[in-house]
Image (tube, helix red, strand yellow):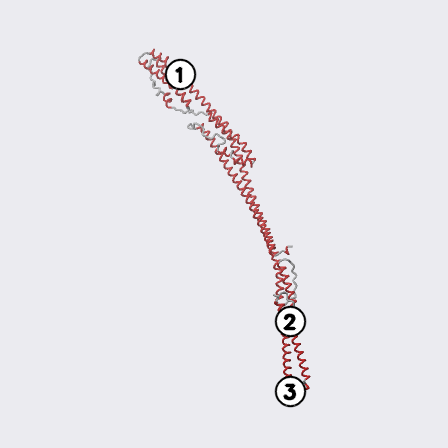
């Protein structure tokens, strides 16, 4: 079947197979490149998420540090960290549409995120509880206040001893200058409840110092009974009122310390536990994305290797098929063409006895068939030329067409030779007739020598003319024979 295809179709088939294989290589490479790009994008996304989660680990450690600063630094009065688990960086990512899409595509990721959601929410909830429980105050307040109260009790004791020893009291009478007064008027707080409790101490404290001024005045006047009376009636009640407010402040400090201790316990027990769980889940997520990134990289490398192998294999097959097709097509063309060229060379030197055994339906087969018809044509004309050379003018030359120059020339030559031989026959007949006339008039030759001589001369002249005519006819016949041979040689060529 391949043998009977046209050369153009053979070439098209060969190149078509090669192009088909190259197209397969191109398509396969394109698809593999698409897979490689997808795997690279997946690996890049996994690496990005991995980096993001590591950053979130760091963020939560910093978040934890900021919470701990509340208990370490006195200048920090309240928490400023994000307490809404949906609004922190990790929470925004966990509840984003992109993460929801990734959870739908990755069940392992969905499970890990679902496990992390509860401790993450609990982590932020502990910050809310700490913020609600924690009371900001100076931890030294309790010690400072106790010390100042002890000093004031000593001040009262000195005042009582002065009365008892009948000595003038030399302690500080200005409520702003005593140790308690200096601390009291120098201390400030942002807590409104503590500020109110401290403010309530001002009036009994001032009244206490006023009573001391009256006592000192009585002592200086030597009125010791009046000094003792003032101590009992004014100083002791003022001290009692001041002590009551002191106890209220002390109770507030104790309660604040307890709340602060409770907040610290929440931080140490609940917050740390929650952040450790979140960190653990984050580490699992990081490991998950590390595995995904490694798997994507491995698949990408496998796709690259597969693509290279496919390109090499299909390329080698395409080369082999191309070489095979080129060999078959070239051999199918050069072999028959060489045979036909050898036949053409033989025909060119007059050898018409050739056989062309090429049988195909392509252009080479058509060329072989044309050469077979040419050889048959040349053989036919050579046969006619040989017949003419053998003085056989009965041959009938039939030109193949009006454009058959050689055939028409042979036909014209045969016709001309036939006409020439006919003319020679006619001339011979006329010669015989003339001879008869000479015979019929031989008797009259005796009538006169001059007439006979004249007739003889005329006859001689006629005979010479006939002889010349015969010679000319013979020459024409020879020329015709030579022309026939030349035509045969031309036909052979």
Of 157 and 309, which appears nearest the observer? 309
Of 384 and 372, which appears nearest the observer? 384
Q: Few, some or many C-alpha atoms within 10 Å of disc 1 (few <14, some 14-19, many ≥20)? A: some
Q: Earlier in the sequence, mark 3 or mark 2?
A: 2
Of 182 and 340, which appears nearest the observer? 340
Q: Residue at x 66, y 77 (%)?
A: 426
Q: Residue at x 44, y 24 (%)?
A: 135
Distance from the alpha carbon under mark 2 to that under mark 1: 170 Å
Query: In the picture shown, does residue 42 fall above or below 66?
Result: below
Q: Nearer the viewer, mark 3 or mark 2?
A: 3
- Determine which of the numbered discs, if any, sits on residue 415 in the image: 2
- Determine which of the numbered discs, if any, sits on residue 241 in the image: 1
Q: Earlier in the sequence, mark 2 or mark 1?
A: 1
Callout 3 secondary element: helix
Q: Few, some or many C-alpha atoms within 10 Å of disc 2 (few <14, some 14-19, many ≥20)? A: some
- x, y (%) of residue 270? 50, 27
Residue 405 sits in quarter? bottom right
Distance from the alpha carbon under mark 3 to that under mark 2: 44 Å
Residue carrying label 3: 451
Of 402 and 393, which appears nearest the observer? 402
Q: Nearer the viewer, mark 2 or mark 1?
A: 2
Q: Few, some or many C-alpha atoms within 10 Å of disc 3 (few <14, some 14-19, many ≥20)? A: few
Asked if residue 142 can be seen in this view, the reply is: no
Identity of the residue furthest to the top in this view:
225
- x, y (%) of residue 259? 46, 23
- x, y (%) of residue 123? 50, 29
- x, y (%) of residue 186? 37, 23
Callout 1 secondary element: helix
Asked if residue 128 can be seen in this view, the reply is: yes
Identity of the residue furthest to the left in this view:
221
Q: Quadrant of the C terminus?
A: bottom right
Q: Nearer the viewer, mark 3 or mark 1?
A: 3
């Amino acid at each position: 079947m391949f043998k009977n295809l046209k050369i153009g179709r053979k070439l098209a088939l060969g190149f078509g197979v090669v192009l088909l294989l190259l197209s397969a290589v191109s398509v396969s490479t394109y698809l593999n490149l698409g897979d490689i790009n997808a795997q690279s994008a997946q690996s890049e996304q996994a690496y990005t998420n991995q980096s993001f989660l590591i950053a979130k680990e760091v963020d939560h450690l910093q978040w934890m540090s900021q919470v701990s600063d509340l208990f370490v630094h006195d200048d920090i009065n309240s928490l400023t960290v994000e307490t809404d688990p949906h609004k922190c960086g990790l929470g925004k990512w966990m509840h984003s549409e992109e993460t929801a899409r990734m959870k739908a595509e990755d069940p392992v990721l969905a499970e890990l995120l679902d496990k992390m959601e509860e401790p993450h929410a609990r982590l932020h909830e502990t910050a809310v509880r700490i913020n609600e429980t924690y009371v900001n105050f100076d931890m030294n307040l309790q010690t400072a206040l106790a010390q100042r109260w002890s000093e004031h009790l000593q001040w009262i004791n000195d005042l009582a001893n002065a009365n008892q020893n009948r000595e003038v009291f030399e302690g500080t009478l200005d409520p702003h200058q005593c140790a308690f007064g200096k601390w009291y008027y120098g201390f400030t707080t942002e807590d409104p409840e503590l500020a109110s409790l401290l403010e309530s101490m001002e009036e009994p404290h001032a009244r206490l110092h006023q009573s001391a001024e009256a006592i000192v005045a009585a002592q200086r006047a030597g009125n010791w009974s009046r000094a003792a009376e003032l101590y009992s009636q004014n100083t002791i009640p003022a001290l009692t009122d001041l002590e009551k407010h002191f106890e209220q402040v002390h109770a507030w400090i104790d309660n604040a310390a307890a709340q602060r201790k409770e907040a610290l316990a929440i931080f140490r027990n609940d917050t740390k536990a929650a952040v450790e769980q979140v960190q653990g889940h984050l580490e699992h997520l990081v490991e998950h994305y590390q595995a995904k990134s490694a798997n994507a990289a491995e698949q990408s490398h496998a796709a690259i290797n597969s693509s290279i192998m496919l390109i090499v294999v299909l390329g080698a097959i395409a080369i082999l098929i191309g070489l095979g097709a080129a060999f078959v097509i070239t051999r199918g063309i050069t072999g028959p063409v060489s045979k036909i060229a050898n036949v053409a060379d033989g025909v060119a030197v007059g050898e018409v006895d050739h056989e062309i055994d090429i049988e195909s339906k392509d252009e080479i087969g058509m060329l072989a068939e044309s050469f077979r018809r040419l050889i048959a044509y040349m053989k036919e004309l050579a046969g006619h030329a040989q017949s003419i050379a053998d003085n056989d003018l009965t041959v009938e030359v039939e030109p193949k067409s009006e454009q058959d120059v050689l055939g028409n020339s042979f036909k014209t030559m045969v016709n001309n030779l036939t006409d020439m031989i006919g003319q020679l026959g006619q001339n011979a007949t006329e010669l015989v007739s003339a001879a008869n006339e000479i015979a019929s008039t031989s008797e009259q030759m005796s009538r006169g020598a001059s007439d006979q001589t004249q007739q003889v001369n005329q006859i001689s002249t006629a005979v010479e003319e006939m002889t010349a005519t015969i010679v000319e006819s013979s020459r024409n016949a020879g020329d015709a024979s030579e022309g026939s041979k030349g035509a045969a040689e031309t036909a052979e060529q």
